[in-house]
Image: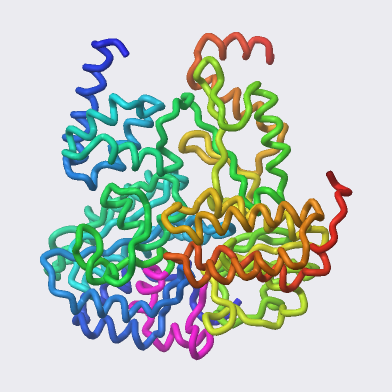
Amino acid sequence: MLMTERERCAAEISALAGKLGHDRASLVPILLEVKRKYHRIDSYAMQVIGDLLGIHPVEVHSVVSFYAFLGDHHQGRFVIRLCRTISCAMQGKDRVMRQLENDLGIRFGETTADGAFTLEWANCMGMCDQGPALLVNDRIFTRVTPERVHDILEECRRVFGVHAAEAKEVHLT
Amino acid sequence: MSAIPTYAAQVPEAGLKAALQTDRPGLISIIAASGLKGRGGAGFPTSVKWNFAAAAQAERKFILCNADEGEPGTFKDRVILMEHPDLVFEGMTIAGKAVGAREGILFLRGEYAYLRGGLEAALARRREQGLLGPDILGSGLCFDIRIFMGAGAYICGEETALIECLEGFRGEPRNRPPFPVNTGYLGFPSVVNNVETLAWAACILANGAPWFRAAGTEKSTGRKLFSVSGDCGKPGVYELPMGITVAQLLMEVQGTDAKAVQIGGAAGQCVPARDFHRTLAFEDIPTGGSVIVFGPQRDMLEVLHNFLEFFTDESCGQCTPCRVGNAKLLEGVERLQAGTCSMAYLKELCALGETMQLASKCGLGQSSPNGFLSVVEHFREEIMGRMLARA
């Protein structure tokens, strides 16, 4: 990481701790915020957080590695979490999975090369009566069909990657 | 529909206003008279929990609302939080008065992040209306609530794991005792209640204990929300009296051709068609509200495989019976699927399941073999001697 990047990262985490608190009870909220902003929690960030809260970075890592929404792996801007639990499984989550993998060209657990999408599994997300369900970051989609997968991905591309989205839209119309 | 007013027909803040007129022992005795038991599934009497926390001497006390609804097939809390958030906050405020707590925390699971905006808005509105804050409705009662986001761990629905997460640790359950009502969040007495329990507490204060007792059975009083999913005509959330039979419920949701019903989620038990006369109540089949209907075409081994994958993924890994046991059961199901499991080995697996029920540290490991054991008991015909036909 560039020195300037490191400094900026440290300053931002420090500001976060100022807002959320310097005690250990603020650890999970700080980590969630860092993950949301940087799409990963690297060892440097863990060191900074450990210093700010007065705990060993290994303690920070133990928490990061425990929770499904944290983790030190890199994620794309859009994390797509497909529910794999029984009710969604009975409503056809396998076909939605296949279509997501086909449309993005990656397998579950991977991130696209442009850093836009990550595919992950989620355990029951409380949409059992309207499955299959998936989350795109914080947004929930229910009764997803393989056909709708394309529209969901296009909507994500439209929100961010400006140039790519414009080109695609021309093709679509 | 019934003559009893339902969840949606509550008068806003009637429960809170009634609670402000009542003293602390009075509040707890109303809840005790109603017989309200924990709606998360464990069924611990709510008044006993409140009483312990009220008796504890401490500088600070906490009301923790458990909105880490992770049990497969459960979504009633999502519906309550979306449509009746005020009822939950009202219940938390009442609990705060009953035990002498001034701080409340709603532990919201990471998967429900999209509910946060609505909940924060409801909290802000309540502060404006004087329903939260240093002097609630001029009564001198001080109580406020904040929201804490979970980070995607089923185990945090266990009350001590939830507290570990709040304190910034891995969500690994603690040994009990000490119970959270004595040594909870940051070492202070804390009441951990399910979303639905708190909402019912508000309804009980508004309508009185006899109103609540009018429905249900002697040991399982009142009504309960059931989350119904799977192979039925009308999946969704149902408010039904405790003690109804599985058959009655299936009639209601148009799932009468079911061959089995999973009650209580992945950690619950699988009830075969011949047992549909049994009742949904703490004294018969206890449940947190999850009802998953399996139609005649479902392969019970696939269901078990899904449940055990879930548990191997969500086990916190702290104690051996749960960490290794679930992996072994999953392997056993794969053997059954491949048709390579001997009767002797199946019996070994059942013995392992019973060991897990006895020796695991928390509810996850104690209840994760339930599904396996009940399917092996009731569907032996279906699962033994498989050929690899569908491979």
Residue B67 percent coordinates (x, y): 41, 57
How was this image coloured? rainbow
Q: Is B216 contained in the magenta span?
A: yes
* Residue positioned 28% across, 24% down in the render: A44
Write down the quadrant of residue B61 in the picture: bottom left
Q: Quadrant of the N terminus of chain B?
A: bottom right
Task: Look at the image and tell me whether residue B364 can be seen.
Answer: yes
Residue B123 percent coordinates (x, y): 29, 53
Write down the quadrant of residue A133 in the picture: top right
* Residue positioned 54% across, 24% down in the render: A111
> Looking at this view, is A112 or A136 the one in front?
A112
Q: Is residue A11 above or below residue B112?
A: above
Q: Is residue B342 above or below residue B119?
A: below
Magenta residues span B197-225
Q: Residue furthest bottom?
A: B218
Write down the quadrant of residue B81 in the picture: bottom left
Q: Is residue B151 above or below residue B192?
A: above
